[in-house]
Amino acid sequence: MPLYAQQAPETETVTAADIEVIQVKGVRSSMQEAASIKRNSMGVVDAISAEDIGKFPDTNLAESLQRITGVSISRNNGEGSEVTVRGFGGDNNMVTLNGRTMPSATTYGAGSGADGTTRGGSARAFDFSNLASESIRAVEVYKTGKANIATGGIGATLNVKTARPMDTGETVASVGVKAVHDTTNRSGDDVTPEISGIFSHVLDNGKFGVSISASHQQRDSGYTGATVNDWEVDYWDDIADADRTWNNADTVVVNAPAQGQLYARPNDIRYAFSNTERKRDNAQLTLQFRPQDNFTATADYTFAENNLVEHRGEITNWVQRGSNTKLVEFDNNTVKTPSYIQETYASAVDEGYEQQWREQTNTLKSAGLNLEYQVNNSLTLALDAHSSELYSRGTGPRNSGELAVGLGAPIVTSREWFWGADLPTYLNVYDDTLPDKGANANGMVDAGDVGSSIARIRNASQESKIKQLKLDGAYEFDDGRFDFGAEIRNMESRSIQTAGNNIALGNWNVGNPGEFGDLIQPFNLPGEFDDYDTLAGGYGFIADPRALYTAAEALYPGIPSTVESALSYDNIVEEDTMAVYFQVALEGELGGMQFDVLTGLRYEKTDSKSSSLVSDVYFQWEDNDDVVAYVDSTVPPEPANAKNDYDYLLPSLDVSLHISDDLISRFSFSKTIARAGLGSLGVSASDFGGGGGSTLLGAQPVADASNPRLLPLESTNFDMSLEWYYNPFSYMSAGVFQKNVVNFIGSRQVDQPLLGIRDVTAGPRAIAAAQAVQDGGFPLDDTYLYAMMVFNEYRTHPDMIAEFGANPQFTGTPAQIDFLANNAGFDLRATDEDPEVIFRTSTPDNNRAAKIYGAEFAIQHFFGESGFGVQANYTIVRGDVGFNNNADPNESQFALVGLSDTANLIGIFEKDGWQTRVAWNWRDKYLAEVNKGGSNNPRFEEGYWQIDVNVSYDINPQLTVFAEAINLTGENSRSHARNKAMLWYLTDLGPRYQLGVRYDF
């Protein structure tokens, strides 16, 4: 692609508005331009030019940005997504397009929570995977605050710049084509296309200009992974304590925790496969009109659309409770974690094979008009207006973001789990000849043993819109410049998630094995792991969820045909912001050394309004540990509203001292703010969880509640750096920074009732059933308590009498337990006699302050005229508030997330038409999430590195061929909870290869 950048005169003080671009070519030239921007800007600024982006073997803009000092990224399916700068994640960074604030909207998988990639909307973080890197000409990363830059970025403000025809004043045309092979692809095309191009032309009289850029990318990929749904953490105590996680006195415990010591219990282990197709289209049209030298009008339109289709499936083996557990062996971690679990079952339990179909479309549209008028030699005015929207929504079958059909084989008679390795493994014993299970009794685990359980049709969407009008002015005088301006901005974001209520098919007992016939095919999922060992004898199945659900409509008449109208939440947040600013740039001499000063003040006032539709919610007890929240679609939701307002005065100061012609020292001070996440600003409660059993026996229901009165985070920032530009292509820099942040949003937990929801597991019926269980000499656990409650509730039901006679008795046999748990219509729902549920409610609150500090080191060096060069940088980030892994699991914690050291090492060769880059990128372990699940666990992303390679050759001045490799060594990602043995997510990834050609006309 053609490249755009400009080297400003070294004697000139450059601010954000000053950085213009001209066409250049070659890696060395683009790196020189990036160094020039860094050298001549006030404050701490890093940049990459279009050539620098285009020449990296990067799939999207996020992956290009990770090369910048202090910038790191998160990944989904091996591809860059959100950007973290100096420890601050996407929600706390501001992204602008040509200086305009961009909307943010991210949903995926209908927010189902089925794995670590699903999202339910309400994001402020801009997802860079929507933008291809080929179509962008430059990105500037402002790490220090300035009065003329929009607020919202505590970590940094990232300004994405696109091409304008009058920046070059000449005709430019280029097209590039790639063939992409992703080695993780399992079901799509082995080779997929990417094509990009640009055309820019200015008429001879220089009054009219037009540029068009576009790109189309397709990627077919997959992964094999593993996850644990949740980790319960508790104190080891009396074996007879009913709320103990393992309370079976007959269980053999090896290397048991000490009395009062914390220990962990996994809910399950899930192996997963994913087959994904992604199509991404980007385009931009820019028109410019310059009727006279002192006036320029620019109109532009940007479009980006990212469509994802994923088929995902699982193998799930649940860890049971009570008398099923025969042996548990613990490791020696401080929070003791099982290294081995053995269970046997009186009858049999199921192994799950849920199939999920996901489709998602993200569409960005942005239209803008800029009018620039040079009043005279000293005064310039600019008026800029734009309207932008980003819409992220599920576009799958049946109006879904995720269609999930639960499958299972109810033939597992015993299980063993082996924990502690990077990938936990399991070993099952199967018997498909058991009576009353319905399997085909052929002595094999096959599709005839597999039936349906529960289906779900979910959708989620987020639509964000921004309208912005800015007036900027600049007045130049001797040895200085005065900038001023005003801005009004309206942001509105609506997030919706459907209730996703359970749809009973064969129900939890998988009542009808073999019902889908050839729609279900065997699939050796455990054998799909390339870099991890699994035990022999595991089984898996694959099926198209769309076909399964169509078949289920005939098998189970009356099930919903599309996504339900009931909503889990419907939240709207609207912010109206008014801002004015001024800043003064001065230059002078001090002791024979040139200095530059840029100081300014920004005043900003925001009025916000939050509104939510609150639905009626109830709990239903469906099996021993299946206490499920439902939205009652027969009761209309009611609106709730709240308002808030705040204003801030934000000073900034940048001082540069030119110690010599090549050596520059800098000091910066600023105050910046970042607004609370949109999901925290609603007016309702959501994410109701039943706690995995009865509250009578110690289960803890959980919920999330929002807080529309939250204030922005406020950061006081200090930077000092020293930069040595010892030749036009090379430099070394070192800097330190500190951010003192108040109003950090912590998670305050409150035990409270919500929305009048009643507790079906702890009322008079549950108390009477518990007594009956004990009187009958049965173990008092959720399995027997639920069965006894159902027996008492439905003793006179015709199905009960048909099964057990006119005077049924509770015998507690496996067959009776199975019947009571899975007979259609035998679920338990709360009544007015039951108490209200006491939810452990996580509520966001401005109750924290923290300090983030660190250092950045960078070098860029070319070895004379040899063609060889190197780029290297290392960033250290620290904070004064971390997560305590030994803390009480009943209490939420506040901790700084995203803090990690990062590094890049890039080898470069450019000579005689050859261009080669080998890029090593590394990010150390970091805390990614706090208070996850019912035990307030952390999620630590483990350290990750990958190597990317790019080689190109210029056949002639117009034609270039190239080859690229991303994640050349096939590195994998993994995350864990309080210790490494407590796996959260593991993804087995592989390299991607690309061959292409680029032609400049």
Image (cartoon, rainbow, N blue to C red):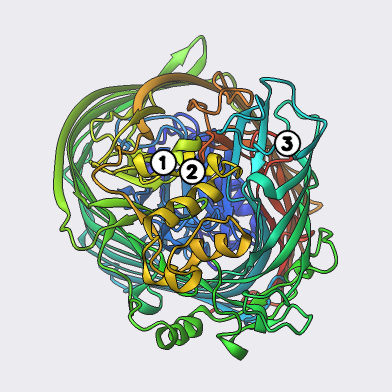
Image position of 102 (left or right of 416): left
Give the quadrant of residue 193: bottom right
Asked if residue 613 shows in the view, the reply is yes
Mark 2 vs 3, N-terminal side: 3
> Residue at point 24% right, 42% down?
755
Labels 2 & 1 near each other (Cβ < 8 A): yes
Q: Position of residue 100 (x, y in %)?
A: 30, 49
- Give coordinates of residue 277: x percent, y percent: 55, 75
Q: Which mark is residue 768?
A: 1
In the picture, the disc for residue 772 is 2
Q: Amino acid at mark 3?
A: Thr
Seen in the picture, residue 368 relative to 998 is either above or below; the reply is: above
- Give the residue type that dot 1 points to: Ala
Q: Is residue 869 above or below residue 406?
A: above
Neighbor class of circle 3 (other Cα within 10 Å; few <14, some 14-19, many 20+) is many
At label 2, the amino acid type is Ala
Query: Which element type, helix, strand or loop, lies under badge 1?
Result: helix
Image-quadrant location for residue 672 = top left
Residue density around tag 1, few if under 14, some if 14–19, many if 20 or more, within 10 Å: some
Mark in front: 2 vs 3: 2
Closer-to-camera residue (684/783): 783
Q: Residue 465: x percent and y percent?
A: 24, 55
Residue occupying image coordinates x 68% and y 77%: 186
